[in-house]
Amino acid sequence: MAKIFCIANQKGGVGKTTTSVNLAASLAKQKQRVLLIDLDPQGNATMGSGIDKTQCENTLYEVLVDGVALAEARLKSAAAGYDVLPANRELAGAEIELVNRAQRERQLGAAIAIVRAEYDFILIDCPPALSLLTLNGLCCANGVIIPMQCEYFALEGLSDLIDTIKRVHANLNRELQIIGLLRVMFDSRITLQQQVSDQLKQHFEGKVFNTIIPRNVRLAEAPSHGMPGIVFDPSSRGAKAYMQFGAEMIKRIRAK
Ligand code: ATP
Ligand code: MG
């Protein structure tokens, strides 16, 4: 039965999607069955997996709003070896459509339940907001992976996210826990980044992943080629780091 993880941080541009697609590809390369759910109307995880978000017959929107089965909407990322539940700008409308429904925060969980046994990992790429969409992700997940840059303001945003996770844990999903903080776009030559990294390890003992993802231009170039960095340039430093992160995740799950 798949473990479900949200990749979340309400701050924009911190590496959620890069982490989602590369972790999905890394796990797939390590023989795991993976479904990546694009929970962001920007559709970046869809495009970054080599799927044209404007050409999908069904997307997450149809699953959430029209009751289309997830199995009818998912697609294979041929390049990267995992399945994708795509999204595009239509998904923004789902927030409004869901508001008046009973169990509005459990719609994604209900859709996932039917295919859960087919996978080892289900990853959810969250939008940069603590919205109803993100809440749907948090309500059905076993845990949250929080990518963050080691910058001064990164720590401020973190407390809102952690409060939200605590509230969801208390009221809606007793399973939910923070799996870990992932340091991304890291440049060890920058003293401030080292300092923030050290602070993180002190404050969140045991919750900071060992793997550090370096700033690496190959990871940034890969989406324009419609593939995760791991597939685009497996020998790059960024790809190697995400391979290692995948291995760390597998190990953590087995240790449970
Ligand atoms: P949003 O909040 O808009 O969804 P995000 O948190 O998903 O953004 P990404 O889209 O993954 O963030 O990354 C933001 C930008 O940083 C992108 O241009 C991406 O290619 C680049 N980027 C991400 N990780 C790295 C890295 N390790 N090295 C270099 N560039 C990176
Ligand atoms: Mg994103």
Image (cartoon, rainbow, N blue to C red):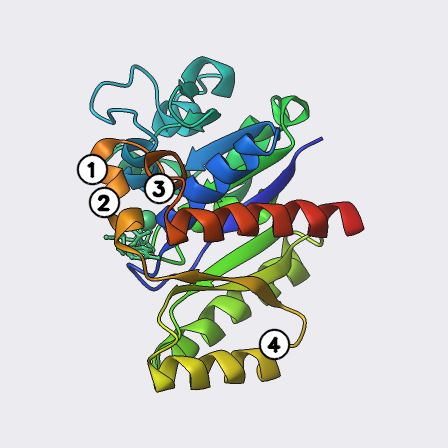
Residue 141 pos. (x, y %)? 60, 46
Q: Residues within 10 Å of mark 2 (few under 14, many from 20)?
A: some
Q: Mark 3 points at which residue?
A: 229
Q: Residues within 10 Å of mark 4 (few under 14, many from 20)?
A: few
Q: Name the residue under label 1.
A: 224
Q: Is residue 43 above or below residue 253?
A: above
Q: In which quarter of the image is residue 178?
A: bottom right
Residue pictured at 58% horizontal, 47% vertical:
139
Q: Which mark is on residue 204?
A: 4
Secondary structure under the numbered disc 1 in the rendered image: helix
Q: Which three-letter amino acid code belongs to the residue tagged 1?
A: Ser
How far separated are the C-alphas under marks 2 and 1? Answer: 6 Å
Q: Are marks 2 and 3 in contact (CB under 8 Å)?
A: yes
How far separated are the C-alphas under marks 3 and 4? Answer: 29 Å
Determine if residue 7 is in view. yes
Q: Which three-letter amino acid code belongs to the residue tagged 3?
A: Gly
Earlier sequence position, callout 4 versus callout 1: 4
Q: Mark 2 points at which residue?
A: 221
How far separated are the C-alphas under marks 4 and 1? Answer: 35 Å
Residue 27 pos. (x, y %)? 56, 37
Task: Give 118 or 168, whichever is nearer the viewer.
Answer: 118
